[in-house]
Image (cartoon, rainbow, N blue to C red):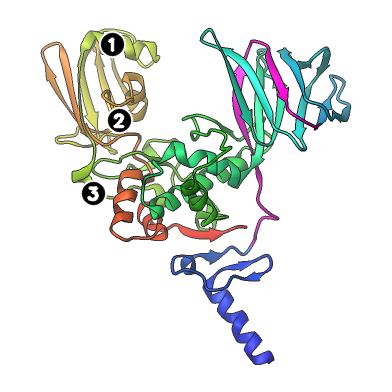
Amino acid sequence: MKKYMLRFFVLCIGAGLLTFVGCRQVPSSSERKLIAYPDRLSGEPDIQVMVLETTESIDLIVRGSYGLKVTTPEGEKKSGGGTLPVTIRVSATKGTVKLGKDSYKNAMVIPTNSELGVRYSESGGSITKSFPGSIEFSATRSGALRVVVALPLEQYLIGVLPHEMELSSAPEALKAQAVASRTYALYQIKTREGQPYDVYSDVRSQMWRPARDADVRARMAVNSTTGVILTEGYRLFPAYFSADCGGATANARYVFSGSDINALSGRENPFASQSYKWALTIRKSDLERRLAKAGISNGRLLRIELLDEKKQPLRMMGRVYFVRLYLENGVERIVSSNSFRLAVGGAKNELSSTWMYLTHRNDSLIFEGMGRGHGVGLCQTGAKLFAREGQDFTDILKFYYPGAVLLRLW
């Protein structure tokens, strides 16, 4: 009997799926490729999502019983709560927040058998949003009110997935996106310890919306990859992703400062012919205005040159890493291509990507390119096409993050 038990235990380790309670039965073929992490977290972490900063007062809406943890202006910690639905006016000044008539350094409201919501004004109208988890209120240095939602990481991902990839995508592509988003989020949690929040709820981090009635496809993609992340040398890295990389994924070293990571060094895109093709014609005067507004340059623009990673002029369409601006009075300036793209306009039908080529024509510039976004890491268009060809999520991730190792942390 001991002999058979030992054999079963060895098989579990070989599958790389040891959990806190033992080995899962009949793991899938893709799960067998996962390696058990030798130093697990104690469990799934919470993530702090900054959802609002405003100089206006807002309403906190509590629909049932709740707990309250506060820090007084003198630094004393107190707790309390209530059992009835209530609406509380919340505002901020420099260093303090006010809940009703009471002032605190910060305040956290914790729902017990209820849901929390906030009501605030935006663009002349009133907006009400409900959030899962706890809400913490604090004041910024300038005196604005900061609203941060705390919730379990997996629950957060279910609210991310529908806003970062179409749920009509093949299941394996959705799983790949879930792992990339989880890795990115966990990296932010670990590198921002001690900060007021981990991530924004918009494109500055990942798009997130509360998922009260989440689509089953989002839940399945997140739940089937629970706790799985990407690592390089058993270390977390920010698993960036973009909508469409064009001809190849970009090297993060030249896009995001300090991102000298082999798994983000870039790869040729086997589906380049199916990438989104775009073109933008813009007058020099308009471009000067946009660059000045972004603080990139201020002066008459004579000419622009697109440069590769070695800062050499690009002779054909390809990945642009730097842009050289020739300004009046002999002034030259080199800026990163991603900063240039965002300054000009990174939306669809504008400067959609940095995989491009430039033609000068009289007083106008004609940019032509392929793809959408910064191009680093997972290419969502490519992931969908890989999945349609029968590749599972581990194959997709190992292609777009070369050398990365998949680990299950919880």
Image-based side of 222 in relation to 307, left or right: right
| Quadrant position of residue 319 | top left
Q: Give the range drawn in magenta.
A: 39-65
| Quadrant position of residue 292 | top left
| Count of all numbered marks drawn on residues in the image | 3
Q: Looking at the image, is mark 2 or mark 1 earlier in the sequence?
A: 1
Identify which residue is drawn at 82% across, 30% down.
69
Please indicate, yes or no, whether residue 95 appears anywhere in the rendered image: no
**Can you identify the residue that label 3 sits on?**
271
Residue closer to the observer: 14 or 62: 62
**Residue 260, image x, y percentages:** 43, 45
- SS of the residue at dot 2? strand
Q: Which amino acid does label 1 sit on?
A: Glu
Mark 3 vs mark 1, CA separation in Å: 35 Å
**Residue 91, image x, y percentages:** 72, 13
Q: Looking at the image, is mark 2 or mark 3 earlier in the sequence?
A: 3
Residue closer to the observer: 26 or 383: 26
Q: What residue type is labelled 3?
A: Phe
Mark 2 vs mark 1, CA separation in Å: 17 Å
**Residue 60, image x, y percentages:** 71, 21
Q: Looking at the image, is mark 3 or mark 1 earlier in the sequence?
A: 3
Q: In which quarter of the image is the N terminus?
A: bottom right
Identify which residue is drawn at 24% across, 36% down.
276
Identify which residue is drawn at 45% across, 42% down.
259
